[in-house]
Image: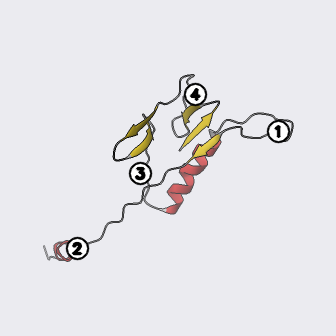
Amino acid sequence: MLEIYNEVVHDLLNPTKSKKGLKVRQHPKKGFYAEGLKLALVTNYNEIEQKMNEGTVNRTIAFTNMNATSSRAHTIVGITVIQKFKTMLDKKQQSRPL
């Protein structure tokens, strides 16, 4: 989960708020990514929601004439889903008597 504020990229799950921010790179197969961005392994929706709340708390907000808690930044959340299936071999191994 990252934030772009004043053209600087910040990691919302590892908020150091350094002046430099993260570097955006391009990989030939993976595409664009933020170098050093923290990745979090989650296994259910509640954990996703917890990480989203954690990142939201770390967002940059500033007073504007329109709204006292306006975010003048853009936030990007990336989610990669990996689905694992149990094979018949795994089931046989799990149900073997000891």
Which residue is under mark 2? Answer: 87
Which residue is under mark 3? Answer: 41
Q: In this view, does 15 lie above or below 55?
A: above
Q: Which residue is drawn at 75% across and 33% down?
A: 62
Report crowding for label 2: few under 14, some 14 to 19, many 20 or more residues within 10 A (C-alpha). Answer: few
Q: Residue furthest top?
A: 19
Report crowding for label 4: few under 14, some 14 to 19, many 20 or more residues within 10 A (C-alpha). Answer: some
What distance separates the C-alpha of mark 1 from that of mark 3? 34 Å
Which residue is under mark 4? Answer: 17
What distance separates the C-alpha of mark 4 from that of mark 2? 45 Å
Q: In this view, does 12 lie above or below 90?
A: above
Q: Residue at x 43, y 44 (%)?
A: 39
Viewer-nearest of discs 3 and 4:
4
Which residue is under mark 1? Answer: 68
What distance separates the C-alpha of mark 3 from that of mark 2? 23 Å
> Which of pointers 1 and 3 lies earlier in the amino acid sequence?
3
Q: Which amino acid does label 4 sit on?
A: Lys
What distance separates the C-alpha of mark 1 from that of mark 4? 21 Å
Observer-nearest of 14 and 7: 7
Observer-nearest of 1 and 92: 1
Q: Is residue 79 above or below residue 27?
A: below
Q: Residue at x 64, y 39 (%)?
A: 59
Element at label 1: loop
Q: Is residue 70 above or below residue 43?
A: above
